Amino acid sequence: MNYTSQNQKDRKEMIEAIGVNDVSELFDVIPKSLRAKDLNIAGGKTEQELLNCFSDIASKNKVLTSFRGAGVYDHFIPSLVSEVIGRSEFWTAYTPYQAEASQGTLQTIFEYQSLICALTGLDTSNASLYDGATAVTEATLLALRVSRKNKILISSALHPEYIQVLKTYLENSKVKLVFLDVSRDGAVKKESLDMNFDENTAAVIIQSPNYFGVIEDMQALSVITKKKNSLFVAVVNPLSLGVFKAPGEYDADIAVGEGQVLGSSMSMGGATFGFMAVKKALEWKMPGRIIGQTVDKRGNRGFVLTLQSREQHIRREKATSNICTNASLNALAGCVFLSGWGNCGFKKLAEINISKARYAYNKIKSLKGFKSKFGGDEVFFNEFVIETQKDVDRINKVLLENDILGPLDLSAYHRTLVSLGLPETQENFKKCLLFCVTEQRNKCEIDKLVEILSKI
Amino acid sequence: MEKLLNELSTECCPAYNLDSDIEIDVQVPENLKRNLSLGLPNVAESDLLRHFTNLSRKNYALSTTFYPLGSCTMKYNPLVNERIAKFDNFTKLHPYQDSKTIQGVLEIMYNLEKDLCEISGMDCFSLQQAAGAHGEFASLLIIAKYFKSIKQKRTKIIVPDSAHGTNPASAAFAGFDIVPLKSESDGSIVPEKLKEILTPETAAIMLTVPNTLGTFEKNILEISKIIHKNGSLLYYDGANLNAVMGMVRPGDMGFDIMHINLHKTFSTPHGGGGPGSGPVGVKAFLEPFLPVPKIESKGNEFILNYEKPESIGKLKAFVGNFPVILKAYVYIKSLGAKGLKNVSEQAVLNANYMLARLKDKIDVPAGCRCMHEFVLAPKALFKNAVRTLDVAKRLLDCGYYAPTVYFPLIVEEAIMIEPTETESKETLDTFVDALIKIILEEASLEPQKLKDAPISTAVGRLNEVEAARNPILKWK
């Protein structure tokens, strides 16, 4: 392919206008000794060849019926979402620097911010971050900036990759991370929270549903946190907010999370988007783009990038974050996704997740050799942990033979956390399986899963 | 004026609805249950489609207009890339699938890393980072970890004043102190001045080559020598790589570490502000510090290796922005070595052609030749309180997106133009005609026309000061 559009005649005229004999003269400033040899890169394929070639490569991947979540989920994506994000006026635009010529992008992000605020019950949302993991990290940094303290209490049932990312970001800082224990019922131990506070504690970070799918008692955890004058950071699955308490209801200061469940395909876990909403008092400290409403000369409503003096292109090394390009198109998908359910429909979507997961949970835990890891009283959204006496590798091997992506084996989880510096006293997750059942799975698929498990 | 979603909301049937073949039976304890109203709009699908379609039409985009944003490389985004990225066997994959079931994905990532090595002259790449600034940040963590590993305390990063704002922000984010370096009027670095600010604590210098004024760093070999003699590292900001593909390689110039913006040089769309991808490339001695997982080839199979004890860790969850990575790889396969070199030749030719037409009329601080972009300094021509901002807004009325303005910071009232290789001579000519007319004629004869601009866009000039003074950041 060749995507340039000059013909020989144009080229000749342009070279003459510049006053050189040849295009290569324009590169004379590069020292001869440095000139690259011919690159060794295959290519030059036509569109048809590309389609064939990449169909072949794609066929080396396998699409499976998924019972696996752990941060990325198979959810229904309405046709309208792909239609809208497929509009080239959206996907071929840049960051909306020229507001008057970018009202489409700006108004949709403003709507996105409004929808995220509605969902979380908080005051102000930014325009998106890279993903859930970096959103947790940015929330932590925000809390550190605001409080000027340097200790963070963090749930050890936070997604291990989120913990990894946070540790990466804090590598060269003096911040102290203290991990909160998880009790036998799969939720954070309240005593552990109480115990670890001191005057230097900037914030408490709790994920709900947590990595094991368990809904935390956010209200109670937040109350303890507030008594100690620390900030409460809620890491939430936005779909679960159709049924479970909104961060604003339990006085969270910051809510963050992964937006993939709001209209982005799984695509290996990226590209997705991270969201962040905060209380009004924190909005000037937020990272990332923020869109605001204003008026034009004639008094018409319009939208612009605002509160920009927080950002790197103005503040350089004193900016609240280095983020520039974020995940705008995925946030747009989130906006379109959230705009079409209505309150009842969105609640029903969450309820279907709960009901289907509960149906599968009840069936699986009553199979011989399988039991609930957390005793059976835990409240969960669409993920749950089952302990088994069977051979875990064999379970997933047999499921894979049936084109099923089985539950996540948690045996490596303990090792991961210890390597991240978590205390050895953590619950052991050997022989434990993390299942996920979303609205995408039907009764027939769940029954088949159960049947296969029963035969292992 | 397009209504907001909450203003469109009625008692109608909302757009989406789901049924369940399993009985919906949900009991949630009171202390966990949501009581707050969701506050979501109720809008029919037909109305939503109109709403979003109408909004899309209020955007200037590459698919509708010339978009000469300097330093952003707004080149054509090939449709075949988008089509391939929509294949089910790419979109419906879970990141925790067994690596045997995602061999196609790993093959693409592995081969893209190899191609980026060949293009850049680096030895290894990581594709995990989600954007350019994310790549910068990862690189700075690698630099920090490297010096820690050889037990040297180096806390300072030199950043020229012509650099993108993300450079100092990323370095500060990674825990370094910033040492600004004043560059010359063409954005270049004087080796003597560099020597003056080097200390045993200097970890690295971040350079953009060609720089943000569009000139190639002619002293790069000497700079490389000076930096390395000091035991410091040389960092390449790849934002402007589109100028030099197949011509010169950062690795050969002496750079130790770099990032690339796949959403610039490698044609993946900007999406209104992401998703992007910011691969990091390093010389072999820095390889142990790259993020995990590393994609490796073992026998006939590709695997993800998490066992890298010296790695800086993870920069985001999972393996990276795979759809963006895929599109960039398709682009490279569509062009091959010859096509990539042609890209840079045409990009530089286009920029120089525009510059040739403008240089005798408008001041150009960096001189009469450039690489893929150039910066105009029209201040001396402005009378009647006209500013660059007015020129930018007037260009919108002429049907063009505006160039980057007020950047780089070292040029007052800067206008930064990057045409890219995918624009025709005709487009360049008509744009240059319009720009000359605005700056040389309208600005003096009809200044009000500029002050009133834009008048043909969805809204007129917006009051940004009011937006910041009285923030309205969501529906009322």
Image (cartoon, rainbow, N blue to C red):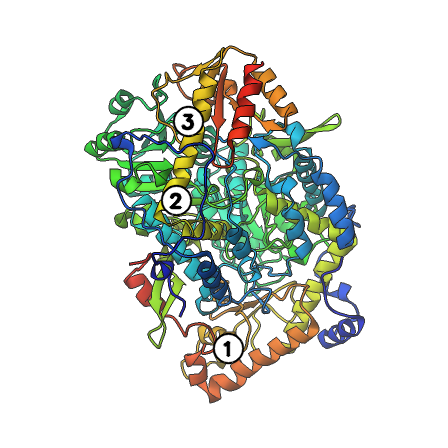
**Badge 2 and badge 1 both on one subunit:** no
State how far apart marks 3 and 2 are (Cα). 19 Å
In the depicted structure, whether residue A106 falls above or below residue A349? below
Within the image, what quadrant is residue A400 found in?
Answer: top right
The amino acid at mark 1 is Asp
Discs 3 and 1 share one subunit? no
Q: Which mark is residue B467?
A: none
Number of marks drawn = 3
Residue A383 in view, yes or no? no
Please state the chain letter of the residue tagged with numbered disc 2 in the rendered image.
Answer: A
Q: Which residue does the numbered mark 2 point to in the structure image?
A: A346
Q: Residues within 10 Å of mark 2 (few under 14, many from 20)?
A: many
Q: Position of residue B294 (x, y in %)?
A: 62, 32
Q: Residue under label 1, please give it.
A: B397
Could you tell me which secondary element the residue under label 3 belongs to?
helix
Whichever of callouts 3 and 2 sits on the residue coming sooner in the sequence is 2
Residue found at x 42% / y 36%: A352
Disc 2 is placed on an element classified as helix
